[in-house]
Amino acid sequence: MAAGPRRPPRILLVEDDAADRELTRRALEAEGTAPAVLDEAADGEEALDRLFRRGPFAAAPRPDLVLLDLNLPRASGKGVLAALKGDPELRRIPVVVLTTSARPRDIQESYALGCNSYLVKPLDAHQFFRSFRALARYWFTTVALPDA
């Protein structure tokens, strides 16, 4: 039996900086991962509300991938990561930490909490696009998402 059509990946971008959200959107478009569905959360509490389907996000679909900044208002990225990976229904969702911190402690703690990848955001847009291209190839080509 032939497999059905693949659905576009649904990504939750958790980032408080509007410029970084725009840069990530442009990187996704440039990589050709469109028609990826990109949902955004501007702080840690909104991310938790989306993930746990609380309040206005009660009917929100679950993401296939979370791109997570560590430095967030209202709830830290590490707190979001711990809550997500600590939940039996959510822990299967891959999480890519996408942050400016290259501190070994942040990297170690993020992996200890269950992140699947850790990408330090370069300050240079061209370098960010190159890094994101490698990330996108892995998560959207190598890793298989469920069929529609």
Image (spheres, rainbow, N blue to C red):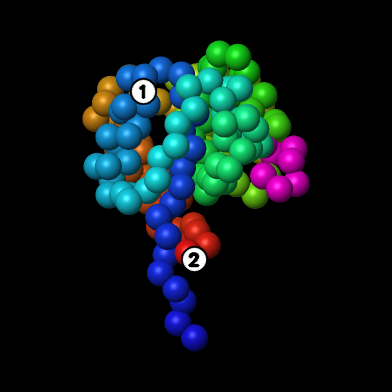
The mark that comes first in sequence, 2 or 1, is 1
* SS class, disc 2: loop
- Residue 146: x and y, percent? 52, 62
Q: Nearer the viewer, residue 81 or 2?
A: 2
Q: Main secondary structure of the magenta part?
A: loop
Q: Which residue is mark 2?
A: 147
Residue located 46% across and 76% down the image: 3
Tell me, yes or no, whether the two marked residues, 2 and 1, touch with CB atoms within 8 Å: no
Magenta segment range? 84-90
Q: Which mark is residue 20?
A: 1
Residue 143 lies, with reference to residue 111, above or below; the image says below
The image quadrant of residue 23 is top left
Image quadrant assignment for residue 22: top left
Q: Residue at x 45, y 31 (%)?
A: 40
Q: Observer-nearest residue: 127 or 45? A: 45
Q: Residues within 10 Å of mark 2 (few under 14, many from 20)?
A: few
Residue 108 seen by the camera: no
Q: What is the secondary structure assignment of the residue under circle 1?
A: helix
Amino acid type assigned to the residue bearing label 1 in the image: Asp
